Amino acid sequence: MNNQKKRSLVNLTKVGIVAALYAALTLVLSPISYGAMQIRLSEIFNNLAVFNKRYIWALTIGCAIANLNSPLGIVDIIFGSLGTFVMTSLSYFLSRRVKSTARKLAIAVVVCTLMTWTVALELHFVNHLPFWPTYLAVAIGEFISMIIGAVIFGILSKRIDLTK
């Protein structure tokens, strides 16, 4: 197997593993992963997007798979996954020239927390929940997950090169 094919296979494997971890963690913790009061712990993986753009796809796929179980149905499968794609893409592009790992992770925490308006909007339209209180509740859960992930991946990045 030549080097190019080997690299492609390694990338595809990493995408698959992260997508599977995201989906599995969401499904195992489904009672707290959906709704207005949620702490979707699988969102810790959103921090990976600042290390390599392949994780944008991994997280989007993982979110789509996890949202197959969502009470919001097809709306969450489409718009929840699109929201994940946008928030992780923004995290990647805003942090790609930043050298400090802590700053990269801080960017991811802020971007992903602010972008939870997409989830609040889904809940507003589908479940008729008030937008602003729902946004605040979802953002708090996202912030908690993202901070946990930032700590974990900050420590891991000192031992493992997450960019490769």
Image: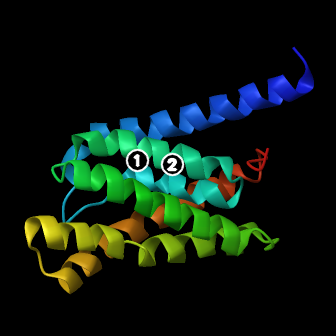
User: In the rendered image, which residue does mark 2 sit on?
Assistant: 59
Image coordinates of residue 25 in percent, x first then y, are 37, 40
Q: Is residue 99 left or right of residue 42?
A: right
Residue at 25% over, 75% down: 137
From what the image shows, is residue 111 above or below residue 142? Answer: below
Image coordinates of residue 29 in percent, x first then y, are 27, 43
Say which amino acid is labelled 1: Cys
Classify the position of the C terminus by image quarter: top right
Q: Can you tell which mark lies on residue 63? A: 1
Q: Quadrant of residue 150?
A: bottom right
Say which amino acid is labelled 2: Leu
Q: Is residue 141 left or right of residue 129?
A: right
Exactly how many numbered labels are in the figure? 2
Q: Is residue 43 visible?
A: yes
Residue farthest left in this picture: 128
Image coordinates of residue 13 in percent, x first then y, are 64, 28
